[in-house]
Image (cartoon, helix red, strand yellow):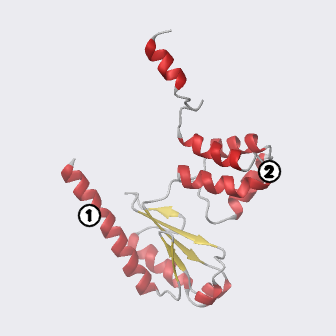
Amino acid sequence: MTTSQSTNTKTNEHPSGDERYKTLDRTMKLFNYEKDALLEVLNSAQETFGYLTEDLLIYISKHLSVPMSQVYGVATFYHMFSFEPLGENNCIICLGTACHVKGADRIVEALSGEFKVGAGETTPDGVFSLTTARCLGSCGLAPVVVLNGEVRGKETPEGATRRVQEVVEASWSERQEAAEAG
């Protein structure tokens, strides 16, 4: 065995070659590979990989000894999980009863029109994703918008559009600066 081969063997590289699996493995180990840790593990996978692929769900299913149907069922039940890459900026609009009654559909319509993207879609440049949720559990703040993890209550179509424009323009500026520097 050459020195470079022995060095590679000792790096403890994950069998998949993707180092992100180590983070997921640590989470599963932390919860002793218990079936009850499924939601935590899915959350860790979403944070680590950015979205859940079929291969990732199969991996979790096997390591937690949870049927794939259950893993998929949990992953599709919660709005926080995505099965496709999301944009740099993510906007979730609650469509629960209270939010719907207070005009959440008008916010979706305004953002869809402004950014030429439908609910559940990402702009072609990957800068903005518009998603909806059945309920975010913040009914007293209706209508609720979550922009890049920040909960914004009593939102209006104009306010949501203005705030999303600000974060999208900041992303475009950062991309332009990176392109000029690189």
Q: CA distance from mark 1 to mark 2?
A: 44 Å
Residue sitting at 40 percent across and 79 percent down?
Answer: 161
21 up-or-down from 42: above or below: above
- Locate residue 156, reporting x and y percent: 47, 87
Where 17 falls versus 21 (above or below)? above
Viewer-nearest of discs 1 and 2: 2
Up the image or down, 54 lies above or below 77; here it is: above
- Please give the label number shown on residue 173: 1
The image quarter in which residue 22 lies: top right
Q: Is residue 108 above or below residue 142?
A: above
Disc 2 crowd rating (10 Å Cα; few below 14, some 14-19, many 20+) is some
Number of numbered discs: 2
The three-letter code of the residue at mark 2 reads: Lys
Residue under the image location 54 percent in, 49 percent down: 49
Residue depicted at x 42% and y 85%: 159
- The kind of residue on which mark 1 rests is Ser
Q: Residue furthest left?
A: 180
Estimate the x, y position of residue 62 in percent, counting from the top left: 75, 40
Q: Residue furthest top?
A: 1
Mark 1 or 2 closer to N-term?
Answer: 2
Name the element at disc 2. Answer: helix
Q: Is residue 136 left or right of residue 157?
A: right
Residue 34 picture location, percent across and down: 79, 49
Residue 126: give its label.
none
Please name the residue shown 68% across and 57% down the image: 40
Pick whichever, 28 or 153, lies toward us.
Answer: 28
Q: Find disc 2 in the rendering and name its residue.
A: 35
At label 1, counting other C-alpha atoms closer than 10 Å, the crowd grade (few under 14, some 14-19, many 20 or more) is few
